[in-house]
């Protein structure tokens, strides 16, 4: 099942906007994505391979969940990455594939 990632996602009662328009910034910083809590924005690169982008999306969403539900205290970068990998594997087995409307 293909799931299209919407332009915004609610996390903990606030809506995070999903952006694809910061390619120059992300490339310069060497990032596949970035979450800005105060701006309620998640920026995703359009340059990475589809599976990598799905992983980055989950990673950034986990940062947003950690911020909204745990004051950014539950997860560090390493655990965020590990949980993203695990979630992606489970979703893949369930036949769920993300589609990004860049
Ligand atoms: Zn991160």
Image (cartoon, grey):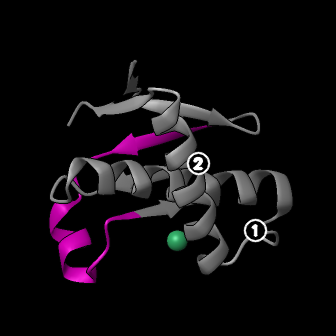
CA gap, disc 2 and disc 1: 19 Å
Above or below residue 24? Residue 88 is: above
Q: Residue at x 31, y 66 (%)?
A: 32
Q: Report the residue marked by disc 2.
A: 87
Q: Magenta segment: does it hold 100?
A: no
Q: Nearer the viewer, residue 53 or 67?
A: 53
Q: Residue at x 20, y 37 (%)?
A: 102
Q: How many marks?
A: 2
Q: Nearer the viewer, residue 62 or 94?
A: 94
Q: Residue at x 19, y 80 (%)?
A: 28
Quarter of the view holding residue 75: bottom right
Q: Magenta segment: does it hold 29?
A: yes
Q: Nearer the viewer, residue 55 or 64?
A: 55
Residue 19 x %, y %: 33, 45
Q: Residue at x 50, y 35 (%)?
A: 93
Disc assigned to residue 1:
none
Any part of residue 36 in sight: yes
Q: Report the residue marked by disc 1.
A: 72
N-term-proximal mark, 2 vs 1: 1
The segment highlighted magenta reads 15-33
State whether label 2 is within 8 Å of ligand 1.
no
Q: Is residue 69 left or right of residue 98?
A: right
């Amino acid at each position: 099942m293909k799931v299209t990632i919407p332009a915004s996602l609610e996390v903990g009662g606030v809506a995070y906007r999903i952006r694809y328009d910061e390619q120059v910034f992300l490339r310069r910083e060497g990032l596949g994505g970035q979450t800005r809590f105060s701006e309620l924005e998640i920026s995703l690169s359009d340059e990475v391979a589809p599976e990598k982008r799905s992983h980055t999306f989950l990673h950034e969403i986990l940062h947003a969940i950690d911020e909204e539900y745990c004051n950014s205290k539950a997860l560090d970068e390493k655990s965020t990455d590990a949980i993203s990998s695990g979630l992606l594997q489970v979703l893949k087995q369930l036949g769920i594939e993300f589609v990004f409307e860049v």
